């Protein structure tokens, strides 16, 4: 199924697909919006391959970057208002748009399904225990067709063969990139690595 043919039936959002797409279009630049559409389609494809609810995967994929282009002040205020870990203040949008951004998805888009919200929450840093839906959004964001970076073809191949191996591969590559470029590593990323990579058997 193509995402432009999707008709919501699960009552996970109080909108039609077209209405939700419109809200994403209004919140994002065209470049980021097109990325979200590709992640939506990739998530649907992975859900079909892995026996996961396609509608939930589609919604999670579509809204995963809803907060990506919010001002930093919005995130800082949310961290304070919701009494989130103050350690978050030491990071920036790359972390915030998932770990904090799910709150904007919940409050502004009225999406209350915890499975979808957690998929948004963990799509940047992962989690030591990820459900198949969370794994799908994590990987769909990484391997959607517009991505072009060293290793992405291997990630696509691996994910198609085994979703969990794809998660391990992305986590290992991401941590390696952060270390190689002297970037700060969010503690959750290390926990994800320890849970997924050493036991994975990937090279």
Image: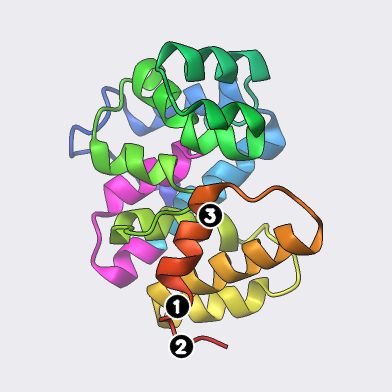
Dot 1 or dot 3: first in sequence order is 1
Q: Could you tell me residue 111's position as x and y percent?
A: 30, 27
Q: Is residue 35 above or below residue 176?
A: above
Q: Which residue is mark 2?
A: 201
Overall secondary structure of the magenta section: helix
In this rendering, would 186 be left or right of 7?
A: right
Q: Are marks 2 and 3 in contact (CB under 8 Å)?
A: no
Name the image quarter holding residue 50: bottom left
Quarter the N terminus occupies:
bottom left
If you read the primary sequence from the N terminus, does the residue marked by circle 2 or circle 3 appear first? Answer: 3
Rendered residue at 46%/54% (across/down): 126
Residue corresponding to mark 3: 189
Q: Are marks 2 and 1 in contact (CB under 8 Å)?
A: yes
Q: Secondary structure at mark 2?
A: loop
Say which of 75 and 32 sits in front. Answer: 75
Horizontal and vertical percent for residue 41?
46, 54
Residue 10's label in the rendered image is none
Span colored in magenta: 46-65
Tag 3's secondary structure?
Answer: helix
| Relative image position of residue 141 (x, y in whole percent) | 54, 53
Q: Earlier in the sequence, mark 2 or mark 1?
A: 1
Q: Is residue 163 depicted above or below 89 in this figure?
A: below
Q: What is the CA distance from the residue labelled 2 to the residue labelled 1?
A: 8 Å
12, 180: nearer the viewer: 180
The residue that mark 1 highlights is 165
């Amino acid at each position: 199924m193509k995402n432009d043919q999707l008709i919501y039936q699960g009552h996970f959002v109080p909108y039609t697909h077209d209405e939700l797409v419109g809200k994403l279009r209004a919140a994002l630049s065209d470049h980021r919006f097109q990325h979200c559409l590709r992640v939506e389609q990739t998530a649907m494809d992975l859900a079909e391959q892995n026996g996961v609810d396609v509608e939930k995967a589609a919604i999670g994929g579509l809204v995963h970057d809803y907060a990506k282009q919010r001002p930093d002040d919005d995130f800082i205020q949310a961290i304070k208002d919701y009494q989130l870990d103050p350690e978050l203040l030491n990071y920036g949008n790359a972390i915030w748009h998932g770990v904090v951004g799910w709150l904007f998805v919940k409050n502004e888009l009225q999406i209350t399904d915890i499975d979808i919200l957690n998929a948004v929450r963990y799509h940047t840093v992962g989690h030591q225990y990820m459900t198949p839906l969370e794994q799908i959004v994590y990987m769909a964001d990484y391997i959607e067709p517009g991505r072009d970076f060293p290793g992405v073809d291997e990630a696509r191949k691996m994910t198609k063969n085994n979703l969990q191996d794809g998660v391990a591969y992305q986590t290992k590559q991401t941590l390696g990139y952060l270390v190689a470029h002297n970037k700060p590593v969010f503690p959750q990323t290390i926990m994800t690595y320890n849970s997924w990579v050493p036991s994975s058997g990937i090279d």
